[in-house]
Amino acid sequence: MADILTQLQTCLDQLATQFYATIGYLITYHDNSPATPPPTASAAPALAKIQKNSTNPPIYAGAASILASTNSTTQTSPPFTAATAAATTPGPANANGAQGAEEAAAAAGLPPRPDSPRTFAARQRELARDLVIKEQQIEYLISVLPGIGSSEAEQERRIRELEGELRSVEAEREKRVRELRVLRKRVEGVLGAVEGGIY
């Protein structure tokens, strides 16, 4: 198992990846309804003029020109509008057709269809919960780091104690090494006597 600092770095990397993935999901699958209505001549637009949320994918200017150019090569067609986009988008009844339409939209550079409001809200909660869990893991790892909760003077005192213990253990190790050398010489002498034979 890795030390606490390595685990902490891994969790921070995972949190950054989760932030990136969450923002990517929110940008890709939101319903594209404007937060504020576009400015008009009057300060307060009439309620009938405010556009309602739609489940249709957004239509970009580049996509309209691409589809218009492909339609003009085959036949003369009416101008591309949001209504014609909704009519050409398959419904959820045909899953294979929907997958084909999503692949065609991806090939044409169109974004995927937005999630339903219920699905979008559920996934937002799930992503938020995952972010909170990862943040709690990071807080736990920080709380178990050695030295957390003690002052600088206490940490210096503890370091001096550990240095003293290290010196005593090192002295004990050197003593054992000297004893080992003496015992090795005795064993070599016994082995030399056995090799020469006992007379």
Image (spheres, grey):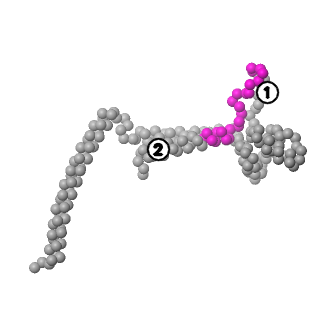
Instruction: Give the SS element for disc 2.
Output: helix
Residue 14 location (% of width, % of height): 52, 45
Q: Nearer the viewer, residue 172 or 126?
A: 172
> Do tag 2 and tag 1 residues touch (Cβ < 8 Å)?
no
> Which residue is at 73% across, 44% downward?
110
> Which residue is at 16% across, 73% downward?
192
Q: Residue furthest top?
A: 43
Task: Please report the bounds of the magenta region as a residue range.
Answer: 22-44
Crowd around label 1: few <14 · some 14–19 · many ≥20 (10 Å): few
On screen, residue 85 versus residue 175, left or right, reads right
**Quadrant that contains the C terminus:** bottom left
Q: Nearer the viewer, residue 8 or 123?
A: 8
Q: Main secondary structure of the magenta part?
A: loop
Q: Nearer the viewer, residue 143 or 11?
A: 11
Q: Is residue 95 visible?
A: no
Q: Amino acid at mark 1?
A: Lys
On screen, residue 140 versus residue 167, left or right, reads right
Residue that numbered label 1 is attached to: 49
Q: Nearer the viewer, residue 81 or 131?
A: 81
Quarter residue 121 falls in: top right
Residue 112 location (% of width, % of height): 71, 44
Q: Is residue 176 above or below residue 46?
A: below
Q: Is residue 30 magenta?
A: yes
On screen, residue 41 versus residue 2, left or right, reads right
Q: Amino acid at mark 2?
A: Gln
Instruction: Give the SS element for disc 1.
Output: helix
> Which residue is at 57% across, 39% downward?
128
Residue that numbered label 2 is attached to: 9
Residue 165 location (% of width, % of height): 24, 45
Q: Earlier in the sequence, mark 2 or mark 1?
A: 2
> Which residue is at 26% across, 47% downward?
166
